[in-house]
């Protein structure tokens, strides 16, 4: 930490150096082009104030003990957000990312200097300039590390707390997870059982409709006044087919979604069989 503090002091002095020949505009010192570039680049990394404010608000969220069973609250706090909530750990993270910020500065500015040498055509000029992907790679790496270390888990936890708070205010009685999954499994099995019967009923209905249409055509040939009846019948049949088709697609989508939910819950539920397979896998490894 003392070394990082020395780096901070040297970097702050680099941002605002004191020179005897410096120019003033009113009461403010006018920075040169290099200082303006460095200050603008440094402003892109000014994340600590916003992060600290976000953590402060996050700590003010009150979560009853009964909400700790919610996975969306328990898992992020356990695996991601806990380190950011600890002041000592956060201080170490700030020091680490300050060093990472300086490394990013050096990497990007070196590539910019290399490109400048190439444009001037000097003796040590690179043959191929750095493209946009290469120039932004250090920045993207820094952003990914920062999000995974200091932000990941906070938004999901706060969203889950907000949803639980809204459910509590509305007085919604949330069905226990086991009962909900049992009812969903029963409904999905019932829907799967209806599919063959529904298909058979649709085929029988189509046969009856075909027979009725044939008889109407014969009757309309002998009595032209029945043409309007036949047209109305065909329109009703087309509307009925469209409705059945939409409901069939909806039933398939609901059935597939229910199966996906049940499979997902079965995979993440610590059943006896799942625990046995986990232990066997660990023993093999």
Image (spheres, rainbow, N blue to C red):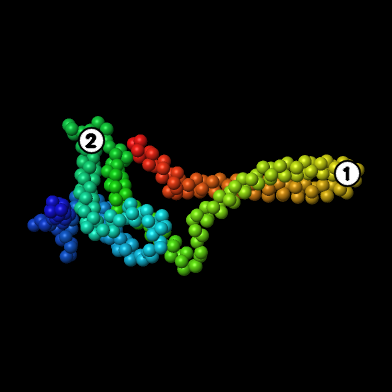
Identify which residue, 179 or 224, lies in the foreground: 179
Task: Return the mark for residue 111.
Answer: none
- Other residues around mark 1 within 10 Å, as few (<14) / some (14–19) / many (≥20): some
Whether residue 33 is visible: no
Image x and y of residue 109, in percent:
22, 44
Q: Is residue 229 visible?
A: yes
From the viewer's perspective, tell me whether residue 170 is left or right of residue 148.
right
Q: Which residue is mark 1?
A: 219
In percent of width and height, residue 59 lies at 32, 63
70 with respect to 225 (left or right) = left
Q: Residue 167, how many percent across, how many down?
A: 47, 64
Residue nearest the viewer, comparing 108 with 259: 259
Residue at 47 percent across and 49 percent down: it is: 265
Alpha-carbon distance for marks 2 and 1? 90 Å
For label 2, the residue is 118
Q: Secondary structure at mark 2?
A: helix
Determine the secondary structure under disc 1.
helix
What residue is at 46 percent from the left and 66 percent from the top? 168
Task: Return the residue nearer the eye: 260 or 55.
Answer: 260
The number of discs equals 2
Which quadrant would residue 133 be assigned to in this image?
A: top left
Q: Nearer the viewer, mark 2 or mark 1?
A: 1
The residue that appears at 87% across and 41% down in the rendered structure is 218
Crowd tier of the residue under label 2, counting other residues whose Cα lies within 10 Å: few below 14, some 14–19, many 20 or above = some
Residue at the spot 49% in from the left edge and 67% down from the top edge: 171
């Amino acid at each position: 930490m003392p070394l990082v503090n020395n780096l901070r002091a040297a970097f702050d002095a680099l941002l605002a150096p004191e020179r005897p020949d410096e120019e003033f505009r009113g009461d403010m010192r006018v920075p040169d082009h290099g200082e303006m570039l460095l200050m603008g680049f440094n402003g892109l990394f000014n994340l600590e104030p916003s992060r600290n404010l976000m953590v402060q608000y996050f700590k003010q969220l009150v979560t009853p003990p009964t909400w700790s069973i919610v996975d969306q609250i328990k898992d992020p706090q356990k695996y991601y957000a806990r380190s950011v909530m600890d002041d000592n750990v956060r201080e170490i993270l700030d020091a680490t990312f300050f060093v990472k910020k300086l490394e990013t500065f050096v990497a990007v500015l070196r590539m910019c200097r290399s490109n400048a040498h190439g444009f001037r055509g000097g003796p040590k000029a690179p043959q191929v300039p750095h493209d946009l992907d290469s120039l932004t790679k250090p920045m993207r790496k820094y952003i990914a590390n920062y999000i995974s270390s200091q932000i990941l888990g906070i938004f999901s936890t706060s969203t889950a707390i907000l949803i639980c708070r809204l459910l509590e205010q509305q007085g919604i009685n949330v069905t226990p997870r086991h009962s909900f999954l049992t009812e969903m499994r029963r409904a999905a099995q019932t829907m799967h059982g209806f599919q063959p019967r529904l298909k058979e009923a649709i085929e029988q209905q189509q046969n009856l409709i075909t027979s009725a249409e044939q008889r109407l055509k014969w009757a309309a040939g002998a009595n032209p006044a029945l043409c309007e009846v036949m047209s109305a019948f065909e329109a009703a049949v087309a509307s009925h087919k469209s409705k059945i088709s939409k409901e069939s697609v909806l039933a398939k989508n609901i059935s597939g979604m229910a199966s996906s939910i049940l499979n997902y819950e079965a995979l993440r539920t610590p059943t006896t069989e799942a625990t046995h397979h986990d232990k066997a896998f660990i023993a093999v490894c």
